[in-house]
Image (cartoon, rainbow, N blue to C red):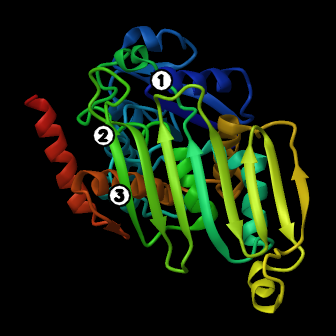
Amino acid sequence: MKTVRLGIIGVGFMGARHAEQILAGAVPRCELAAVCSQAPEQMARFPQARPFERSEDLIRSGLVDAVLIATPHYAHTSVGMDALRTGLHVLVEKPISVHKSDAERLIAAHTNPRQIFGVMFNARTDPYYQKIHDLIRGGALGKIFRANWTITNWFRPDAYFASASWRGTWAGEGGGVLLNQCPHQLDLFQWLLGMPQRLRAFCQFGKYHRRIEVEDDVTAYLEYDDGATATFVASTGEAPGTNRLEIAGDNGRIVLENDSLIFARNEISASQFNRTTTELFAAPPSRVETFSFSGHGLQHVGILRNFTEAILDGAPLIAPGAEGIHSVELANAMILSSVRERTVELPLDGAAFEKCLQQLIAKNAGA
């Protein structure tokens, strides 16, 4: 195989963007062979590709080697499982599934190691987050003490939720800011820090938006098994919003905000200075290192190129599909914690959240 023949299932906003990038030649050795949508007018935008109204027909057409799934969230699981079981390579838009149990089913369908299964976590291509990842994994920060991420620059007006009937509903979307806007940040949080042992979250549902059922404001507190703690704050109702990540460790503090990455590096670790100093109000001396980059990486194009290279050249995936479950689990756990008004232990009981989600769907269907 010299070229990957790609089919895009779902050519709404994101699917159409991916199709346009491929047709513009931004993804070498990848050709748009087919598109699938229940809206003929959406497919008509891409006359170069064979149109299909049903994903099953596209998957079994023999025209594609791989599919990119950009449907509404719930279909990610069923369409992804069908494509994997048919032998195609699969790239799924975030989130890979609405809830953990579905994510487990999708991942379990990937049984052939020669099939490439990836997730569209394009933020992993950002050099700022890659640098933080390298600093943490390389030990520059030492033991992690605390992390805070305030990510409230996801503002969405009512018109956004009115643009499609499935938006802002438990039955159509399965969640709000955590499942739609913040999978990238939740993925990066666990990619940088690992999964917490427990969390307590406070979600507000439809706080800022009329006629939506799902969470649009979240504050969560996370605890890790090594004693580290973290907070995660997200909203789609604040303007202007904030995107500020702070990670404090034994050897200093990292802050990323407004395209500025600053590492205040301690000359002596905090723990060592704490044990050895005889001064009452002293603190370890530190020096500031600043990192800047010309952009935020290749983003979606980078993931598409990497997916193509994984199929054709055996390149390692930037975002393997199996890792997509972590952001889903964090989102589910935060919603479950808020609904039950108590701390939730991780790993999450996927069946418990699935039951909770069905209750939320039923409750709002009768409203």
As displayed, is residue 189 above or below residue 285? Answer: above
The residue tagged 1 is 156
Quarter of the image with the N terminus in it = top right
Q: Nearer the viewer, mark 1 or mark 2?
A: 1
Along the line of sight, which residue is nearer the eye, 113 or 250?
A: 250
Mark 3: which secondary structure?
A: helix
- Numbered circle sitting on residue 333: 3
Instruction: Give the residue displayed 43% in from the left and 59% down from the top.
Output: 110
Q: Give the mark, 1 or 3, whose residue is nearer the N terminus.
A: 1
Instruction: Give the residue displayed 61% in from the left and 66% down from the top.
Output: 146
The residue tagged 2 is 174
Inspect the image, locate mark 2, and give the three-letter code of the amino acid beneath it.
Gly
Quarter of the image for residue 159 reads top left
Distance from Cα at disc 1 to Cα at disc 2: 17 Å
Q: Give the mark, 2 or 3, whose residue is nearer the N terminus.
A: 2
Q: Nearer the viewer, mark 2 or mark 3?
A: 3
Distance from Cα at disc 1 to Cα at disc 3: 23 Å
Instruction: Give the residue displayed 78% in from the left and 68% down from the top.
Output: 252
